[in-house]
Image (spheres, rainbow, N blue to C red):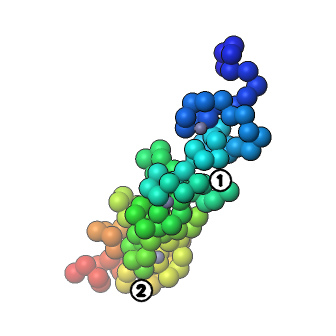
Amino acid sequence: RHYGDSEKPRCGGCDELIFSNEYTQAEGQNWHLKHFCCFDCDCVLAGETYVMVNEKPVCRPCYMKSHAARCNGCQNAVEPEAQRVTYGSFNWHAEPECFQCSCCSKCLVGQRFMAVEGMLFCSVECKKKTMS
Ligand SMILES: [Zn+2]
Ligand SMILES: [Zn+2]
Ligand SMILES: [Zn+2]
Ligand SMILES: [Zn+2]
């Protein structure tokens, strides 16, 4: 932090000093309220849930519409705040209904599992039954 930055925070969006007492702190920077916006729809994100996508903030609705990972179990979008399991390019809600053995439906959250082409198995036996 060099001389001249003074005690006023600098906006990470427009690079100007922020003279208002109200501003947003996010991603390790300060922002004018109006300059921390959804990259897709431009809504102001102050106080809202947002998600960083490729280092750009997007609001929750835009995230769910265009960016969310799809659960390989229930095929629904995975909410940004949801617990998830990622394996390779596949995602699952970390829920018993979604992250389960493709053969016997055993819940695999926190368990050892095998993943084959997006299918999950709890054991070699289950894999053999389904894949053969
Ligand atoms: Zn600004
Ligand atoms: Zn948006
Ligand atoms: Zn799911
Ligand atoms: Zn099984």
Above or below, 68 against 11 in this view is below
Percent across and percent down for residue 34 are 60, 47
Percent across and percent down for residue 65 are 43, 68
On whether ligand 1 comes within 8 Å of the CB at mark 1, the answer is: no
On whether ligand 4 comes within 8 Å of the CB at mark 2, the answer is: yes
Q: Is residue 123 visible?
A: no
Quarter containing the C terminus: bottom left
Q: Secondary structure at mark 1?
A: loop
Among the 4 quarters of the image, the one containing residue 118: bottom left
Identify the residue under disc 2. Answer: 104
Q: Are marks 1 and 2 in contact (CB under 8 Å)?
A: no
Mark 1 packing: few (<14 Cα in 10 Å), some, or many (20+)? some
**Residue reaching furthest top?**
3
Give whichever of discs 1 and 2 has the lower sequence position. 1
Q: Amino acid at mark 2?
A: Cys
Residue 46 disc label:
1
Quarter containing the N terminus: top right
Q: Nearer the viewer, residue 67 or 109?
A: 67
Q: Is residue 26 visible?
A: yes
Percent across and percent down for residue 116 are 31, 68
Q: Is residue 33 left or right of residue 40?
A: right
Above or below, 63 against 18 in this view is below
The alpha-carbon separation of the residues under discs 1 and 2 comes to 45 Å
What residue is drawn where x is 25% and y is 79%? 131
Q: Secondary structure at mark 2?
A: loop
Above or below, 2 against 53 in this view is above
What residue is drawn where x is 58% and y is 64%? 81
Q: Nearer the viewer, residue 116 or 6?
A: 6
